[in-house]
Structures are given as structure tokens and as C-alpha cells.
Amino acid sequence: MNRRLFCRSAMGAGVALATASRAGLGAAAAPVRREGAVKLFTPLELRGVTLRNRIAMSPMCQYSSEDGFANDWHHAHHAARAVGGVGLLIAEATGVEPEGRITPNCLGIWKDEHVPALRRVTDFVRERGSVPGIQLAHAGVKGSRHRPFHPTPNAFVPLDEGGWMPVGPTAKRYGGDGPVPRELTVAEIRRITASFAAAAERSIAAGFQVVELHFAHGYLGHSFLTPLMNERADAYGGPFEHRTRFLLETVRAVREVLPEETPLFVRLSCTDWVEGGWTLDDSVEVSRRLAQEGVDLIDCSSGGATRNARIPVGPGYQVPLAERIRNEAGIATGAVGLITEPDQAEQILAEGRADLILMGRELLRDPYWPHRAWVALGSDTPHPIAREYAWALRETRR
């Protein structure tokens, strides 16, 4: 669609909406009153941090940085959802090393110079009543890729065009393109663990109140856990105890530098959905150990180790993962994956299947989803949307 047609369409849609509103057709539906508190809008306490509600923005790469620096886009992305009432905003997968980025345009926190621009984002988020969090990550074998809106999306960025050599637990490619990754030495593994810890310290300096470690989706952390990607024969490969070593060592290093009041999350791919891969049983067991190491919540995702996985995608398809880990590992969990409707989110929490609802694309579509959910569920808590908007909205003045 060219620009002229787009403008005509947008104007037409605006006129139609305004007409419907004047006719009384745009009024919000009357909320359904519930007995007892609405769980979705019950605060969640984790260590020294209280989330105003159980709605979290899942980390979503924006592919809009240069040399890892945050900019106006990151500020706008987070500000909209803070104004919209989200309880916890987790910044995208943020590289702990330059080679830890997925693309050259991903956010980074490998040097002190990154801190001030991130602080601008977190200051605004906190002023609006939301909690800023950050996901620390290393892309591993999936690094040095073009961003999705590049003419050759997800293709390997050649070394002479600003790319870098991917690394992993094993010299094994993900998919059929790009160079064979270089297998990490033990010394390099320990250096990356130290990079996670240094990044966690910078995260606190940048004003983040929650830190999440990314051990999912086939990136470096997950690639050590799953037998599908880890074929090492030393202390970091082979049996479960060895494949989980990098995770546990990294958690210990990060927990040691974080203030006691700072919650620590770990995002896991709770199953590879492939025979012979990482399983939900594995995730339950490692979550028990993570709880003992000072992790406060498991962010329960799945997949990413292979393109051959048969994933039963559908509304709430990953909720059973969060439910089982919560019940059997004795740790709080976050549910993620095609959770889009207020009643759906409320039911998950009310039934004790998870403690937190993480939303990705739905919050891209609607930054004010918490306000819509507050109206739909008839919550008697203060309205989540910013007062600068709430005063003008009839449904907030019950």
C-alpha cells in the first residue's frame, strides 16, 4: 500500500471510529463484577520489589541499536507500556559481550558507557509506577545475524561487513547457513560467566530492579543445556550435571553481585519438543536447584534448539510448563505464549498455574492492554493507566 492510500485508509478508519463513538457504539462494555480480588491486579512481591500487578512485558528484541546503545526508540517502546499500566517491563535480550548479540543492532551492556542511556529509560519507567527489568543474554551459535527487517533477514553477517565468528559449546551450526561456530574453551566459558556478572552490576547502575538470565531459545545458555546442541565431553557436556554447570555457575556469579533485594529470573526453554532433547523433567530438576541458588522466578518458554521441533502452538500452550515447575520445583513461575485475553490470564493465575503473566506481541499490538483487562475483569484496584489519560476515560471513574 502506498503512502497516499495508507493515509486515506487511516483517515477513513478514524472517521468511522469517531462516528461510532458519537453514536454511543464506542462505549466500553460494562465490567463484570467478580467476588474477591482480581488476581491479575494483585501486587506480586519478589524480594524487595513489588510489582503493581501480575502483567509483565516479555523481552522483545527491537533491533534498533548502534554499538549496543539505547536510544529514543527504546525510551518510547518502554514508556508507552509503562504509561499503559504494565507491572514489569523486561528489556530485550541485551548482550553481555559484543559477540553475544544476535544482530549488530541489538542492545548491549558490555561497557560502562551503555549505562546512562539505559538509565534514561529506567528512570521514566519507575516514575510511571512500573518496574524496569533487563534480560542478560549471549546469542552463542545464533549470533552475527541480520535483523528481521533487513533485505536478507536472519542471514549471517559476513566478517568483512561487521559480523563476528559465532561460538558455542560445540563446533556445530544451527541450521545450514553461516560458518561452523568455534567451540569455547573452558577459560572462555568462565570469562563469559564473568561477563554476565559484570553486566548485572551495570544493570543495577542503570536502574534496573529485576535481572533475568536468558537460557532459552537455542542461544548460548540453552545450547549448553540441551543434548541437541551440546556434544562436549568435558565438565560442561555429557550428563545432566555437566550440561547444567554453566547455568549454575552463571547464576551464582550474578546472584553474588546483585543486591539482596533484587529479584533474579531465569528464562528456560522448558522442553525442546524433540525426543533426545532437553525435557520438562530436566527443567523441573534444574529449577529446584536454581531456587536453592537464589533464583526467584522461572520464565517458562520452550523450543529453539532445532528447526525440527513439533510444537503444539495454540492459546496458552506453554502454561502447563509453568504449572508443573511451580508445583514440583517450589519456585514462582511466569507463563508466556499466546496469552491474549483478560479472562484467560486471570484464570491461569486464579488456578495457581503461574504467578506472573508475560506478554509479547499482544503488548506490541496494544500497549494499553492492562487498562482493557482492568475494565473487562471489573477490578476494584486503582486503574493501571496513567492519570494523564485516566481522567478522560469514563470507565476509570466508577
Image (cartoon, grey):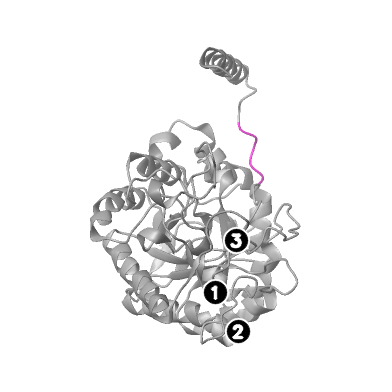
State whether the magenta stretch is mostly helix, strand or loop: loop
- Residue 237, placed above or below residue 371: below
Quick one: label 1 or label 2, which is nearer the N terminus?
1
Name the residue carrying label 3.
174
Say what secondary structure mark 1 lies in: helix
Query: Which dot marks residue 238?
Result: 2
Say what secondary structure mark 3 lies in: loop
Identify the image quadrant of residue 191: bottom left
Circle 1 residues within 10 Å: few <14, some 14–19, many ≥20? many
Q: Quadrant of the N terminus?
A: top right
Asked whether residue 162 is in view, the answer is: no
Circle 3 residues within 10 Å: few <14, some 14–19, many ≥20? many
Q: Position of residue 313 (x, y in %)?
A: 73, 54
Q: Disc 2 versus disc 3: distance between alpha carbons?
A: 19 Å
Task: Please check the rendered image and state whether residue 48 is part of the magenta-colored stretch, yes or no.
Answer: no
Quick one: label 3 or label 1, which is nearer the N terminus?
3
Asked whether residue 221 is in view, the answer is: yes
- Residue positioned 32% across, 43% down in the render: 71
- Residue positioned 57% across, 13% down in the render: 5
